[in-house]
Image (tube, coloured by chain):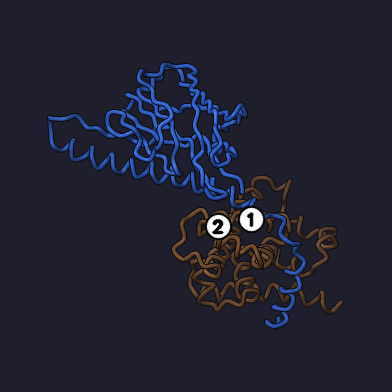
Amino acid sequence: MESWKQTLAELSRDRFASLKRQAFLLCGNDGQAEDLVQDALIRAFAQPMRTPRPDAAEAYVRVIMVNLFIDGARRRSRWNRTAPLLTGTDMSADPADQVLTRDVLLTALNDLSPRQRACVVLRFYQDLPVAQVASALGIGEGTVKRYLSEAMTRLAARLSPAESE
Amino acid sequence: MVLDEQELRHHLAAAADRASAPRFTVDDLTGRIRRRRAKITGLVSGSLLAVAAIAVAVPVALSGPGTPPTAHPAVGPFRLSFTVAVNGQPRVFPKNGPPPSFTATPGEHLRIRIGVTVPAHAEVTTLWLGISRGVFTAPGPHGRRPASMDPVLAHTRKPLTPGLHTFAMTWAMPTGLPRGTTLWLVTGWTTRQENASVGQGVAELVTPR
C-alpha cells in the first residue's frame, strides 16, 4: 500500500472524529464541518508529503482546515454583500435560529470574525500556544493576541447574560 | 465583564461534542485524492514541459538563423474530446471533470474502445494511445512515442482530420498487481498548430480492493 494511503487509514481510525469536532467549532454547522474536513484531507493528501507520519499529517490537515474555513468565510461574506436578502447577517440573530442551534456558545461564536473564531478554536480548543496559532494562520503573534482579546470581550458579552438567566 | 479561559475551554469541548460522527470513509477519500493527484501530476508534467520548451526555444531563438525552434508547449491550441468504453461499458468523460474510472482485475482481457473527436478547423498530426502508471507525457520531438507510455496500444500514421475517430484495442491487465493499483489509459498527441504537443489521461484502470 502506498504510504499516503497507510497514513490516511491510520488517521481514519481515531482522528477523523476529532478533526470533525474542530471543524464543527469553526463552522457551527454539521454539514459544512463534514465538507471542510473532507476538503482539507483531500488537499493535504493530494500533495506528496515529506513526512507522512499520522501526527504530522494530522497537524497539517488542521492547518489546511482553518485556512480553508477563513477563505470560505471570505467568499461567503462577498456573497452576503451581494445577496443581503437571501443570507443577511440578521439571520444568525434570529431567535428562532438560536432555538434551533440550542447552543449559546455556537451562536456567540457566530459573532466573531473568521480569524477571531479560528484563533479561539486553535488556542482554547486545540490548546496551541500563541506562537503556533500565529504560524498556522500566517499572522503575527501580536495580531493573534489582539484577535483573542477582542474575541474574549465579545464572547463574554454574549455568554454572561445567558448564564445569568 | 471577564470570561474565564478554563470556562471557555469547557464550553468549547462541550459544543464540539455536538458534532456527529464523520459520515465519509477512507474509501470515499482515496478515490478523490487519487484523481486530484493525477490532475496535479498532469499539470506539473505539463508545466515542466512548458519550462523545458522555453529552455529549448529561447537559446535557439537567440542563436540566430539556423535550426527552427522545436518547442512543445504542454497546452494545445484546441481540446480533443474523448469517449471511452471498456468491455462494452461506456463511461462519460466530463468536459472539466476527472477522467472516468474502470475496475479491472489482474490478468483480465480488456476490449478498449476510445473515440477521439477532433474539432473543426483542427488537425492532429500524431496520436498515441497506451498505458501509463500515472505520468502523462507528451510525445517527443517529431511526434515520437511519449516516454512514460508503456505499452503503446495504438498509434496513428496519418494526420487526423476534424470529426470522430474510433480506436478499438485489446489489452490484458498485468497479473500480480496489488489490490487498489491504478494504471492509466493515456494519450499523447501533437498538432502543427502552434507546434503543440500534449499528454493527458483518458481513463483510469483500477484493480479491485
Q: Residue at x 48, y 72 (%)?
A: A140
Residue A5's disc is 2
Rendering coords of residue A111 (x, y %): 70, 65
Quick check: A31 left or right of A47? right
Q: Residues within 10 Å of mark 2 (few under 14, many from 20)?
A: some
Q: CA distance from mark 2 to mark 1?
A: 9 Å
Where is residue A39? Give x, y as percent: 60, 54
Amino acid of disc 1: Val
Quarter of the image where one finds residue A133: bottom right
The reply to whether dot 2 and dot 1 touch (C-beta < 8 Å) is yes
At which x and y percent is residue B28?
A: 64, 50
Look at the numbered disc 2 and give the secondary structure of its residue. Answer: helix
Q: How many marks?
A: 2
Q: Colour of chain B?
A: blue
Q: Which residue position holds label 1?
A: B26
The amino acid sitting under disc 2 is Lys
User: Does residue B79 lie above or below B132 as drawn?
Assistant: above
Q: Colour of chain A?
A: brown
Q: Which quadrant: the N terminus of chain B?
A: bottom right
**In the image, is residue A14 above or below residue B116?**
below
Residue B101 screen position, x and y as percent:
58, 38
